[in-house]
Amino acid sequence: MGRMEESLKEFLYCVALNPEWNSVKTEAQKLICEMLFPAFENVQASFSARSPTPYNRLKPVFFNNFNYFSVEDVPLPGGSKDSVFRLTKASFAKSDEFPMNKSNDCPEVCGLSDEKVTKTLGNVLSCLPGVGLKRKHPSTSEDVLKAELPAKANYESKWEESASRSQMRAIPMDLVDASDFECSLCMRLFYEPVTTPCGHTFCLKCLERCLDHNPHCPLCKENLSQYLASRACKKTLLTEELINRYLPEELTERRKLYDEEMKELSNLNKDVPIFVCTMAFPTIPCPLHVFEPRYRLMIRRSMETGTKQFGMCIADQLKGFADYGCMLQVRDVKFFPDGRSVVDTIGVSRFKVLSHGQRDGYNTANIEYLEDKKVEGQEYEELLLLHNAVYDQAKAWFTSLKDNLKAQILNHFGPMPSKEFDTQISPSGPAWCWWMLAVLPLENKAQLTILAMTSLKDRLHAIRRVLLFVTRKRPR
């Protein structure tokens, strides 16, 4: 491309970073030969150089018995350890004292003027940042430094002009193929692309789903446990910017598809995710240990959609899960390095399952929410009397428990909720009823039966019968 000075600049940076890189040194020396003697091509020479050390000069012999320049290690302004290479003219003689070896087909270089050599070296020097004119140099290079100022200003203007043209340079649209930006997991255009430490790019959601099952890269199988533990899934901005610029229509279609999926997943009446595990009740905490890949995906989706809710049901041998359950609200999630998590949830509302289904391995259901039937007049007064009597009975039973048992209950479920003056203010009834139902030693089927009741009166009668039973059976 003819951009020799820029190439030389990059080669010198490489040598500054790795002084032992001999192949790069050789390429840099070849470039300097071509820049010093542009009229000749295929200049062959033997090169020899020592490993550079700080503040030591290197005098590589480009041609037999002839030194054209020396390389000096010059510190950058940032610190004494950082350095770049600087070229200075060491010797350039026109004398028969240094005859050229006829065996190497090198041209007669002595005919070049000092002015041309100085100008070329000045251009090379000007492309190296950190080379200041305030540093004192040997007298042999003073002339070069004086000639460096105008050359450097001229080169900087040309460099800025070239950089601005490069930024304005556009890639022809016919060279951009959408298939080059397809995720190898979903075979669709990248959406929120992330790159693994091993250098492979995927959609964020696709990579997370793979890591749910196996902490290895889906392509090269490199271990990504540390990547998974740090949760450092940050978008690859360059890939995203390229897609925005060159594939706007495809990206719009991809974003539309993603929004439709999120809208479908955020529906809390149709295809609601169901966690099949244990009994849950409104207003009662329900901590969960999530380790199965399907439930990792389910919890993550509930967080991504913003609903932070999912259903909890107990298992059923025939249908897969029971016909009644409780919606849980995620309050906090704590992740472990191996992908497991502890999810802090609390019961929100009860529901009835209308139909069972599945999505991506976990269960789903179409549901309708349950509310207690409200009563008025004489029925409400009778309900209020029953409510107060059962509450006092429940409190007396809990007070009579042994201290160690009470401590375990308080640690897991918290203190017993206080009595509410309006028993019908909540669609699910008084909170203390659900706390007592979770604490009482009942089987899941019995708890499920009480959970499904929409009459507060029936629920209070059921709790009273259980309290009478456990009180009589308790050993004295």
Image (cartoon, helix red, strand yellow):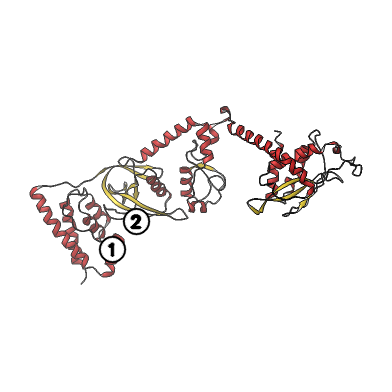
Give the structural element (helix, strand or loop) at label 2: loop
Judged from this view, the residue extending furthest toward the right is 96
Q: Residues within 10 Å of mark 2 (few under 14, many from 20)?
A: some
Return the residue at label 1.
Answer: 410
Is residue 220 shown above or below 434? above
In the picture, measured across the screen, residue 192 lies left or right of residue 159, that is left
**Label 1 element class:** helix
**Image point (77%, 43%), residue name:** 143
State left or right for residue 472 relative to residue 78.
Answer: left
Q: Report which residue position mark 2 lands on.
A: 287
Separation of marks 2 and 1 at Cα, in angstroms: 14 Å
Q: Which residue lies at the image location 55% right of the left edge and 35% below the top edge?
A: 180
Image quarter (top left, top right, bottom left or bottom right) of the C terminus: bottom left
User: Can residue 398 be seen by looking at this rendering?
Assistant: yes
In the rendered structure, which amino acid carries the disc numbered 2?
A: Pro
**Quadrant (top left, top right, bottom left, bottom right) of the N terminus:** top right
Amino acid under disc 1: Leu
In the displayed structure image, the side of residue 194 where residue 105 appears, left or right = right
Name which residue lies at 47% across and 33% down: 251
- Where is residue 87 drawn, in percent x and y? 75, 45
Q: Measuring from the top left, give residue 42's x and y in whole percent.
A: 80, 36
Where, by quadrant of the figure, is residue 273 drawn?
top left
